[in-house]
Every structure is written in C-alpha cells, then in structure tokens.
Image (cartoon, rainbow, N blue to C red):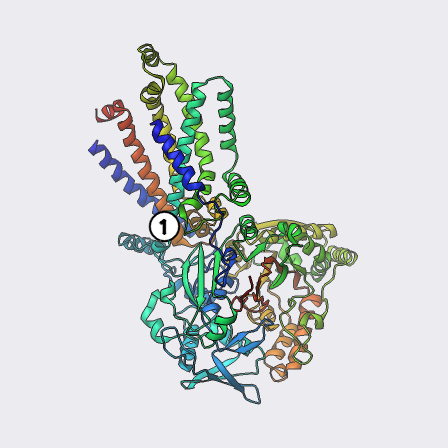
C-alpha cells in the first residue's frame, strides 16, 4: 500500500512537471506560421447566419462566408462577392455583378440564385429567424436572379445604408443544394458548413475554441496568402483574470479587460478603449397603468421625467465604470451614422440633448411634488447577469436620483426575467428600467423606430407623441424618403423631441470595451454599428 | 444481496421519473423564455415556440420527452448552442468533467487520508494541530481562491503547468483544476479520518494487536484503516458526485468545456432541455454512487452484508 502511494505521487509529479515550458500552443509562441490566437469572451450560439443573433456567432460567420459587400476598417462597403454594382439614378435599383471566380468550397460557383435562396430562407416563417424583418427595414421590395451572375434588388425608397447592410450575415448567400442536403444538420459542425469567404472553419469545440484557416478557393486567396493571418484561433475564455494571465504569458494576442483591470493596464502597449454601439438608457414607463403601481402614475408627469433627465451625472458614471464607456449625449450613439452631405457624425451634428444640472433637476422635482401632492418613489429594474457595469450603473443612478429627492428602490433581476417583466406578456410590469439597444445597421432609424407609438414590441414605456411619430414617419416614408438631408433633419428633431422635450427615455452611457491587442497584430476592426471584423488580421512577429 | 440491489434499482428508476416530472414543472414555472432577446417581436416568439413545440401543453411535452428519451434523444438546445442535439453537447463535456472530478477525488483521498492518519498517529502534538489547521483552511477557503492562487503562482509565475485547459495536453492542463477542486475533499476526508482513527487506535483490539507484536504500519493498514474507512466512504459518495458533475467556477477560471458551466448557463438562459438533461445526469450519478457506497459497505465490513441478508 505504501509503495503504491509513493508510486502514484512520483508519477503525478513526473507527468505534471515534465517539460514545464508553460507553452500553451497558442499563437503567441508560434513564430513560424502566421497564427493569431484571440479571445472569444462568449461562445458561438449558431453558425447558421439566419439563426444566430450574437456578436461572436456573426464574427465567426463573416470569417467563412462572404456577402455581396464587405466592410473596410472604417465601415465603408467594399466589393466582395459582387465584382461591381450599378445603382439606378433614383437610388431604387441595385444591380450586382457577381464575380466569375467566386466559388463555394465544394467547387460550385457562387450565383445570384444563392442570394435569392438565402434571402428567401431568411424571411421564411419556418426558419423563424430573429432577423426576418431586416429586409423590410432595408426597404427591399423585390430581388431576383437576372442570370447566374446578375442579382437585382429593388428598394421601395432610397436607403443609404443598404449597401453596407449586404455585408451583414443575414444577407449572405446560401448554396441551396448543400443546405437542403444537410437538413437539420446544417451548420452544426465545420463539416456541415460550406465556405465562400476568406477562411474555412477547421474546428469548433463549444466552450473551448473555434479555428479558421485560409480558404484556397476564395476569389482573393492570393492576396490573403501573402498578407493576412494563415490561421486564426478563437479561444473561449470568460474569466477576465486568467485571460489576462494568458495574454501576459504570450499565449493570446488580445484580451478584453474588466473595469478593475483598466487602471493597471492602461499604459501597456496595445491598450485600446473601443466604443461599442450599445446605448444604455432608462426606459420610463408612463403609458401603462395596468398594474396600478405608484411609479407608473407618477412617471406620466412631465416634471418627474425632466427631473430624472437632469439629475444624472453621466460623466461620473462613465468614470466609475472605467471600461471605456462614455457619457451619453443623446439616444443615438457616437459613430452610428454620418450626415449625408457633410459627413459629420450624428452626435456632432446634434450636440448634447441631455445635461447634468442638479439645480434644474431639483426645480423640476419640486414642481412635480407640487403637482402630485407627494414625494416620488419608484423602482429601478435592471439586469443582474448582464455584466458588472450594469449593476454599478444602476447603483450610481439610484444615488444621483436620490440626491434630487426621489426614493429609488433597486430591483435587480436576471435578464430573462427583466425582459419578461418589461414585455407585453406581463403588461410592462416596471417603473423605470435600465436597458440597452445595439444598432442593427448604421442609421438613426435603428433607434428611432423603437419609440414610435405603433411599435408594440419595443416601445415598452408606452411613449405616445404625435409630434415624434410625425417626424419619424416623414423621415422614413414622407419627404425624407427621397431627400436624404430632410431625413437627417427629421431624425435630429425627433431625438430632441424624444429626449429633451418629452424625456421619454433617459440616455445614460454608451458602452465601451477596454482591450489589449498584441502590437504585433493589426487589422482587428471594430464597428460600432456592424459586426466586428477579424478577417483582415495581419501578423508581424 | 441480489434481491436488495434489484429493489434499490427499481426504487431508483421511480425516483428518476419523479425527478424529471418535477424538473419539467419547475422549468415551466421559471419566468421568461429561452429566447431572451430584446429584439424579438411577439410574432417571432410565437414562431419560435411553435418551431420547438413549446406551445404544446405541459403534459404533452412531458410524455413526448419521456418517449424521446427512451430512444436516447434528449432534445435540442434552444439558446446555448441553438439546434444542437443535447446528447452531442453533453457527450464531449461529461468526459472532461469526470476526468477533472476523478483526478480531484484521487488527490483529495490520498492527501486527506495521509493528513488524517498523520494527525491521529501524532494525536495532541504539533503535527496534529498543523493538520487540523490545514483542514480548517481547506474547508473554509472557496475553491476559486485556491484556483486563482495556483494559476498565478504555479502556472503564471513558475510556468510549471498551463494556465488554461488545453486539448492537446489534457492531463497536464487538468492538474491545477483538479488540485483546486481537491482542497475541500482533502480537508473533509482528513477530519473524518483523524477522528475515526483516534477512536479505533484507542480500542481494545488494537491494543491486542500491538501486544502480539504486529508491526506498526501493518497494524495501521490492516486493522485501523479498514475500520476507519466505513464512515469515510459515506462522506466520499456525495463528494464524488459533486466533483464528477463539474464545478462551474473552476471550469470558468480554467476555460474547461465541462458540464458544470453548461448546466449553469442552461438555468440562466432557460435552455430547458439542457437543464433537464444535466440535472438528470446529476441525479443518475448520485443514485448510482449511493448504491455503490451501500454495496461497498458490505465489501469492507462483512458484518453489514450479513445483517442485511438476515
């Protein structure tokens, strides 16, 4: 028995400590091949581009599938499967010429029919795609394969963001023969996928990693072979502390930092603060008195809402979060869309439509108390499993509102419960909710549509303003439909109406992400209004 | 004995059926849906419910689930890996969790027994006190603290082992997670071994053995340890199931694609099939281990077997 014990212990020590170079087979230690190992903070949910809804899945899909266009580092569309395109003078008809050398990895050519099939599948109720509405949003009225290599799209109104949207996975082509052959199995493993993009997926173990290697059949394979990473490994690491250790050991080429890690690392080479498109705001429930809550009745009072709007020190909240987030100046995030004539960012054009002014907030609060005849108490609903920054932000918001005189009770719930309470199923059972919206495309419409009175799915607070509705309608279907400048001005005015005049929603912060990227690695492109791109990575070790 | 085992197996099957039913009811009571996306409209939600058959009444879903389960079909994931067969998701993950858990159990048992025996043999000396202090620390320090300490010093500073789990060197990269997980079983087993051993060492038959001149180590292993093992095995059963079914915290820290993290995500995201399948596996393992423990009693102490047969 004693001998057995010693034997086991000796064996464990030998195996455990042999060859202790600490190398983890990652990109950092692999100098001969242009391999890059990046962190995936969340897993892939689906490789089917009609089923996925999350950033990681979309990033993985853009590695292996190419749409008509792709995006450059600044988010501008570049031809990809389409060699060229023509737009009619009225901006309503797009005719795409698909490359002759565009092929799927099984040798089939990429044809216009692949787009027709893909788009048909997107809107098919049997697919139950979360993004089935996006064709309509892009004003797509019809699409057809004129011939094998010519794809024609007709829009109902000129849509400035249409071309960039063709780089979004929902618009990607699909090889009908392959997809139908695979049936339910389609996209479940790398062998059940077909590639026409710059990379092929070589492995995928959920919870561990997914890997890509150059696709020799890609139309631009020669340039890729010369310039870009030969292999891109995504390692799923959720724990920020071990992820940082892994980066510092040279086994990872980038790492996402939590707010606590930023101060110690902000002078490290390769540190960046990137802005995401996620806008966090307070949704104020003013239209639903079903629950006979104190809050809902009080929140219909305009002075109450103005007091909330002015009470919050957004700069201080961003400083506390310390993760690259910035104070919100309006409901439209920075970097979402630019003026069609001047190219100026929406935020620069609009300026700040919110301000921190504690005296003004107190005045509004006093006026509200005088009107209502009592102090105002309400619940702040927020997500407890949606990141530490949300919990911190909710506590900060509570603090600032209480400075003005409100009594705010925090009501933290898991996301599934938060959405359930706020939705129609529970008749919007909340007072004020800290929530967020990420843009689906680079246009103010992606936010403005949320708050029109007819939007029963998203307008949880029950905001109902004829002026706001009219501005949005004019932008999207009226004069703005044919005049991009009018459309732009309508949206600028709509934001003022929604936020400043009515205080129907209270923007708080635009989420950021602090990250360190190995200085030897370039070309990871962040798009606040589109999918981040990892398909242009270059390595210079 | 055969009759006894048969009876236990039948009770176990009935228990499992009840467990599935209760799980189904609990899933149904959980707020929210498996489709937690603020962007979904009512119509889209209805389509998704229909697609996955969630629009059917609870009892129909339950019976359908049982029927499919008998053919090995545990359904598909709604949220974590959309449309993946649960059996495929679990297959890969369970093996890794069992490997880490088994390693942790081996580390824990060896170290726990050694510490306990050492403490008992040196009762009331500084060695005994030291072992007690180690046990108390082991019980009270959470495994993730040990995990991060091991990660930082052994992997990051000394570079002796990989920081994260690595498929290409599974054994080496599972040593640290197993060590972190073994801290609590080590402490538990050490405490039990110590107190049992002290009792046994003070008993008459040990005195007799000593007076007959049996060598110390032989006496400890043949007589003292054997009698000490029974209560320890009772503790080890549940400990083992806890370890084998994975620890979400340890899996998260070391990036291990195990079943513990999967189950937690399943609960958080209302991925019903994942939660039910993971809980079911947990139950099966628990019941199986308890059955084995019962049988082991008989092997270690024939008196128990005789009394049960009688």
| Front position in the image: A20 or A328 | A20
Relative to residue A335, is residue B87 drawn left or right?
Answer: left
Question: Residue A22: where, in percent of width, then height?
Answer: 49, 47
Residue holding disc 1: B277
Question: Residue B141: where, in percent of width, then height?
Answer: 52, 35
Question: Residue B282: where, in percent of width, then height?
Answer: 37, 43
Question: Residue A331: where, in percent of width, then height?
Answer: 65, 66
Q: Quadrant of the N terminus of chain B?
A: top left
At x 34%, y 47%, the residue is B20
User: Is residue A255 depicted above or below B254 in this figure?
Assistant: below
**Residue A89 visible in image:** yes
| Front position in the image: A199 or B245 | A199
Relative to residue B131, is residue A392 drawn left or right?
Answer: right
Q: Chain of mark 1?
A: B
User: Is residue B217 depicted above or below A385 in this figure?
Assistant: above
| Front position in the image: A202 or A489 | A202
| Front position in the image: B2 or A421 | B2
Q: Using the rendered view, name the quadrant where residue A504 is placed.
A: bottom right
SS for tag 1? Answer: helix
User: Is residue A496 depicted above or below B302 in this figure?
Assistant: below
Q: Using the rendered view, name the quadrant where residue A204 is placed.
A: bottom left
**Residue A93 visible in image:** no
At x 37%, y 30%, the residue is A5
Relative to residue A301, is residue A158 drawn left or right?
Answer: left
Q: Residue furthest top?
A: B211
Q: Quadrant of the C terminus of chain B?
A: top left
Q: How many marks?
A: 1
User: Is residue B309 depicted above or below A244 in this figure?
Assistant: above
How many residues crowd mark 1 within 10 Å: few (<14), some (14–19), many (20+)? many
């Amino acid at each position: 028995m004693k001998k057995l014990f010693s034997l086991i212990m000796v064996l464990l020590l030998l195996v455990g400590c042999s060859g202790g170079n600490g190398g983890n087979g990652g990109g950092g230690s692999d100098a001969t091949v242009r391999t890059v190992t990046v962190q995936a903070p969340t897993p892939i949910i689906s490789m089917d581009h009609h089923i996925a809804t999350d950033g990681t899945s979309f990033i993985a899909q853009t590695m292996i599938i190419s749409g008509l266009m792709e995006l450059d580092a600044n988010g501008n569309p570049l031809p990809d499967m389409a060699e060229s395109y023509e737009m009619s003078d009225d901006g309503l008809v797009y005719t795409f010429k698909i490359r002759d050398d565009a092929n799927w990895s099984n040798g089939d050519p990429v044809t216009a029919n692949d787009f027709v099939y893909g788009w048909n599948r997107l809107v098919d109720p049997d697919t139950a795609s979360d993004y089935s509405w996006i064709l309509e949003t892009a004003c797509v009225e019809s699409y057809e394969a004129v011939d094998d290599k010519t794809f024609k799209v007709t829009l109902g109104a000129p849509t400035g963001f249409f071309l960039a949207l063709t780089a979004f996975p929902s618009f990607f082509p699909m090889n009908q023969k392959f997809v139908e052959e695979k049936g339910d199995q389609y996209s479940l493993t790398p062998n059940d996928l077909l590639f026409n993009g710059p990379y092929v997926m070589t492995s995928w173990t959920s919870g561990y990693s997914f890997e890509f290697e150059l696709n020799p059949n890609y139309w631009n394979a020669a340039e890729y072979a010369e310039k870009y990473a030969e292999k891109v490994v995504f390692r799923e690491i959720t724990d920020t502390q071990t992820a940082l250790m892994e980066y510092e050991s040279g086994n990872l080429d980038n790492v996402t930092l939590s707010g606590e890690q930023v101060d110690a690392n902000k002078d490290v080479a390769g540190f960046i603060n990137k802005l995401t498109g996620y806008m966090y705001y307070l949704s104020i429930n003013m239209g639903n008195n079903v629950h006979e809550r104190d809050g809902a009745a009080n929140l219909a009072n305009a002075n109450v809402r103005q007091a909330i709007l002015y009470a919050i020190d957004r700069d201080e909240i961003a400083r506390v979060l310390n993760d690259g987030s910035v104070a919100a100046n309006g409901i439209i995030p920075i970097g979402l869309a630019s003026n069609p004539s001047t190219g100026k960012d929406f935020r620069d054009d609009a300026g700040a439509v919110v301000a921190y002014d504690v005296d003004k907030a107190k005045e509004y609060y006093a006026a509200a108390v005088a009107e209502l005849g009592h102090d105002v108490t309400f619940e702040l609903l927020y997500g407890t499993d949606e990141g530490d920054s949300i919990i911190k932000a909710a506590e900060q918001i509570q603090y600032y509102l209480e400075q003005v005189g409100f009594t705010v009770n925090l009501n933290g719930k898991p996301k599934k419960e938060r959405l359930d309470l706020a939705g129609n199923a529970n008749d919007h059972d909340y007072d004020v909710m800290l929530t967020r919206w990420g843009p689906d495309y680079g246009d103010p419409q992606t936010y403005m549509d949320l708050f029109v009175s007819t939007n029963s799915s998203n307008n949880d607070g029950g905001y109902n303003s004829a002026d706001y509705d009219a501005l949005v309608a004019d932008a999207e279907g009226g004069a703005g439909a044919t005049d991009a400048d009018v459309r732009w001005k309508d949206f600028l005015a709509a934001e003022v109406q929604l936020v400043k005049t009515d205080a129907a929603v209270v923007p708080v912060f635009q989420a950021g992400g602090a990250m360190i990227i190995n200085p030897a690695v370039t070309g990871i492109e962040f798009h606040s209004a589109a999918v981040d791109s990892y398909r242009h990575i270059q390595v210079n070790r | 004995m055969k009759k006894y085992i048969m009876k236990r197996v039948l009770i176990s099957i009935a228990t499992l059926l009840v467990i599935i039913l209760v799980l189904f009811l609990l899933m149904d009571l959980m707020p929210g849906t498996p489709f937690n996306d603020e962007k979904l409209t009512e119509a889209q939600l209805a389509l998704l419910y229909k697609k996955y058959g969630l629009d059917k009444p609870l009892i129909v879903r339950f019976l359908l689930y049982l029927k499919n389960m008998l053919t090995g079909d545990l359904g598909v994931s709604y949220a974590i890996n959309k449309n993946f067969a649960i059996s495929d998701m679990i297959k890969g993950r369970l093996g890794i969790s069992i490997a880490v858990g088994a390693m942790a159990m081996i580390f824990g048992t060896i170290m726990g027994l050694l510490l306990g025996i050492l403490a008992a043999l040196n009762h009331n000396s500084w060695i005994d006190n030291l072992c007690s202090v180690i046990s108390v620390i082991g019980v009270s320090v959470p495994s993730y603290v040990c995990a991060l300490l091991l990660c930082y010093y052994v992997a990051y500073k000394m570079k002796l082992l990989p920081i994260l789990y690595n498929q290409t060197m599974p054994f080496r990269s599972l040593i640290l997670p197993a060590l972190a997980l073994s801290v609590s079983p080590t402490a538990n087993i050490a405490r039990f071994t110590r107190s049992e051993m002290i009792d046994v060492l003070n008993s008459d038959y040990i005195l007799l053995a000593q007076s007959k001149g049996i060598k110390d180590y032989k006496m400890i292993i043949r007589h003292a340890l054997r009698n000490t093992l029974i209560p320890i095995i009772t503790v080890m059963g549940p400990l083992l199931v806890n370890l084998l079914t994975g620890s979400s915290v340890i899996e998260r820290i070391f990036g291990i694609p195990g079943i513990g993290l999967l189950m937690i995500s399943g609960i958080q995201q209302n991925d019903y099939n994942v939660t039910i399948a993971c809980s079911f596996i947990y139950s099966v393992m628990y019941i199986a281990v308890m059955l084995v423990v019962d049988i082991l009693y008989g092997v270690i102490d024939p008196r128990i077997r005789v009394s049960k047969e009688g």
